[in-house]
Amino acid sequence: MTVVKDIFVQIRSINGKTYAVKHNEVFLLDGVGLEIWQLLDGQNTVMQISEKIAEKYNKSVNDITEDVIEFINELLEDKLIEIE
């Protein structure tokens, strides 16, 4: 499964914090959330994203995958991304 960002979402950084903005709704992206967001390019699968995050933070892919899926589900609920 690959996911892509909704074309109407804009990313803004203000005072060191990063936000996703869509139709006047604002969503805060924390550090790891922003990293996941940047990997949502339609090329990376959820597993590939999990592997990249796990490698960067020296964590188990199994532990990271659950968190990545949870975050992606939140983005889907907020309609910030779409499944391809």
Image (cartoon, grey):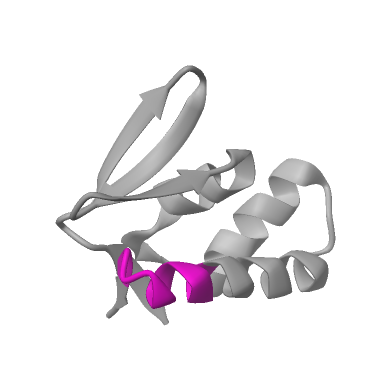
Image quarter (top left, top right, bottom left or bottom right) of the C terminus: bottom left
Q: Is residue 64 left or right of residue 34?
A: right
Query: Is 12 part of what is drawn in magenta?
Result: no
Question: In the figure, residue 78 lies in which quadrant?
Answer: bottom left
How far from the left and from the top, in percent, is residue 1?
Answer: 42, 82
Q: Is residue 57 left or right of residue 77?
A: right
Q: Residue at x 62, y 45 (%)?
A: 32
Find the residue positioned furthest to the front. Answer: 24
Q: Is residue 61 left or right of residue 4?
A: right
How far from the left and from the top, in percent, is residue 55?
Answer: 73, 49
How far from the left and from the top, in percent, is residue 42?
Answer: 30, 65
Query: Is 74 part of what is drawn in magenta?
Result: yes
| Depicted 46 relative to depicted 20: above or below | below
Find the residue positioned furthest to the top. Answer: 15
Question: In the figure, residue 12 lies in which quadrant?
Answer: top left
Q: Is residue 54 left or right of residue 35?
A: right
Q: Which residues are magenta?
A: 72-81
Q: Residue at x 35, y 46 (%)?
A: 20
